[in-house]
Image: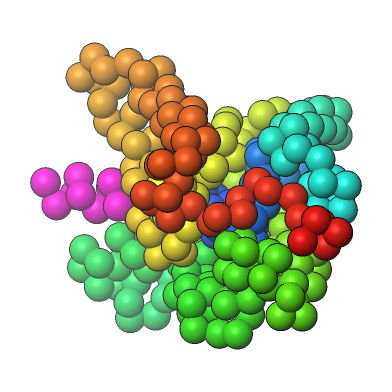
Amino acid sequence: MIDFLISIVSLTIPAGTALLYGTLGEVYAERSGVLNLGVEGMMIMGAVTGFAVTTATGNALLGILAAAIIGVLMSLVHAFASVTLRVNQVVSGLALTMLGLGISGMMGKRFIGLPLAGRLTPLDIPVLSDLPILGPMFFRFNILVYFSILLVPLLWFILYKTHWGITLRSVGENPAAADAMGINVSLVRYLAVMFGGMLAGLGGAYLSVAYAPAWIEGMTAGAGWIVIALTIFSLWDPRRALLGAYLFGGVRVLQFFLQPLGISPNLLNMLPFLLTIVVLWMISEQAFRRRIGVPAALMQPYSREER
């Protein structure tokens, strides 16, 4: 039983890491009032960019940096469309996802089947990694896993305990009032969306450089859509995002353990996407939005002239 528990936990945390990166970024974007359905596109572009740069340079850290940059650049497309042009955020996000999937498929053709040189390897933390039970459960992961965990308390503190966090939340709740107080609403939303894009790119790079060091077309397998559901599941709180990401990661891991019992893995694969559809429908209902505390200005473009 202990061995089974160790296996589940040690596999769940890596499986949920890419989801955690994407969710933390989307929490900040939506807190500013911008829904970004382009997470899937940014993650897949981060994955192919991270793999390509790591393959070319033999340096995984350069690949991760490049993935973060491509995530930021792609998020700027969505920020320009939704904040500056004030187009429908759902349409803009969907277009970004389709763009990312198309470009990544074209870029990645030459990398299919290639081994990755310079992949991130697990770090054995002295003393802690040798602890019985706890060592193999929590202290034998690569640096991106540890960094994602450290981001959770840091981003929670920034969001709720700093002036920047108050500014971000005020823009997402009442942009007109924030503007009247001298806050540059457009700038805050741009920065939040770019930060979300950076973390989505990191999540994609984690998949291709560390978790499964290879490039496979469509390797994100809908992770960006699960991120949207997890953001709502977490109630836009980084701490709950950690729980949600590992919960969904655990569901994916359980597929391999439940198959011998005759439970279809396709059923388990389908559940996260059904949940995504349900939560997107629910946040369109005003009564539900008020009940769970959806940022009041989410998906609402802002113009100073209409104040």
- Based on the picture, tell me whether residue 4 belongs to the magenta stretch: yes
Q: Nearer the viewer, residue 59 or 159?
A: 159
Quadrant where the C terminus sits is bottom right
* Region rendered in magenta: 1-13
Q: Is residue 303 left or right of residue 97?
A: right
Q: Quadrant of residue 60?
A: bottom right
Which residue is drawn at the image coordinates 57% and 77% (left, top)?
Answer: 166
Q: Is residue 272 left or right of residue 82?
A: left
The colour style of the image is: rainbow
Q: Is residue 218 left or right of residue 137?
A: right
Picture coordinates of residue 253 (x, y %)? 36, 38
Q: Is residue 142 left or right of residue 247?
A: right
Picture coordinates of residue 22 (x, y %)? 58, 52
Examine the residues drawn in magenta and state their main secondary structure. helix
Residue furthest left in the image = 1
- Based on the picture, tell me whether residue 274 belongs to the magenta stretch: no
Q: Nearer the viewer, residue 70 or 122?
A: 70
Picture coordinates of residue 225 (x, y %)? 56, 36
Which residue is drawn at the image coordinates 58% and 62% (left, top)?
Answer: 173
Which residue is drawn at the image coordinates 72% and 58% (left, top)?
Answer: 193
